[in-house]
Amino acid sequence: MSEFVLKIQDLEETLKDFAFVITTDWLKNALSDTDCGVDPANENGSLAVQAQLSGDDIVVLSAIQTSITAPCARCLEPVALPVSTNNSSVLSPMRKRGPLPEDLELSQEDLEVTFFSGDQIVLDDFVRETVLLEVPMRLVCNDGCDSEHVRKYLGDDPDNPEPKEKIDPRLAPLMEMMAAMKRGQKE
Ligand SMILES: [Zn+2]
């Protein structure tokens, strides 16, 4: 079921405020089909919306505040990532345009028009996409990786001396670094 819904009958020609809670349960569910290891943090977030009718169109201003965790690219430990975004968009009713001619060349501007149809605006997909866009391509621990975590990841855990059988070949440089560190300790 959709969580973040604006009913068009509630909107007016002046900005109206709407406040939603982005629960960790909702976020967990929304992120469950991604394979990038993104999870909600422990606290609920918020979605604040201001919306206004503008002729046939609807102006939507939104602010998302929440926090997620995503795995560090080096040591795989979850890294906390606060999410704070502000967006504005203009939604046009679907019927205004009708089907586009096949040979029409679309400009970038055309592609960014967002449509709505029916008697409500559902923001669930928008919230999900916006949160996912906040995850950087390469996320690493803020204060450098904890060397214990890197050791565990590489199978060099003092509590578990047997190395993991399969080690990603992309980790070879790290393995060499660890080996060099070990040699340094022995000397
Ligand atoms: Zn790390």
Image (cartoon, helix red, strand yellow):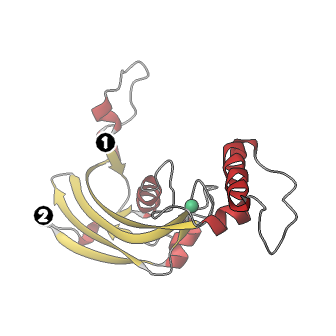
Q: Nearer the viewer, residue 79 or 93?
A: 79
Residue at numbered disc 1: 113
Residue farthest to the front, as pictured? 187
Question: Mark on residue 13?
Answer: 2
The C terminus: image quadrant: bottom right
User: Which quarter is ligand 1 in?
Assistant: bottom right
Q: Ligand 1 within 8 A of label 2's CB?
A: no
Question: Few, some or many C-alpha atoms within 10 Å of disc 1 (few <14, some 14-19, many ≥20)?
Answer: few
Tag 2, which secondary structure?
A: loop
Q: Nearer the viewer, residue 67 or 170?
A: 170
Q: Is residue 183 found left or right of 94 in the rendered image?
A: right
Residue drawn 35% across the image and 46% down it: 94
The residue type indicated by label 2 comes to Glu
Residue farthest to the top, as pictured? 103
Residue drawn 46% across the image and 64% down it: 143
Question: Few, some or many C-alpha atoms within 10 Å of disc 2 (few <14, some 14-19, many ≥20)?
Answer: few
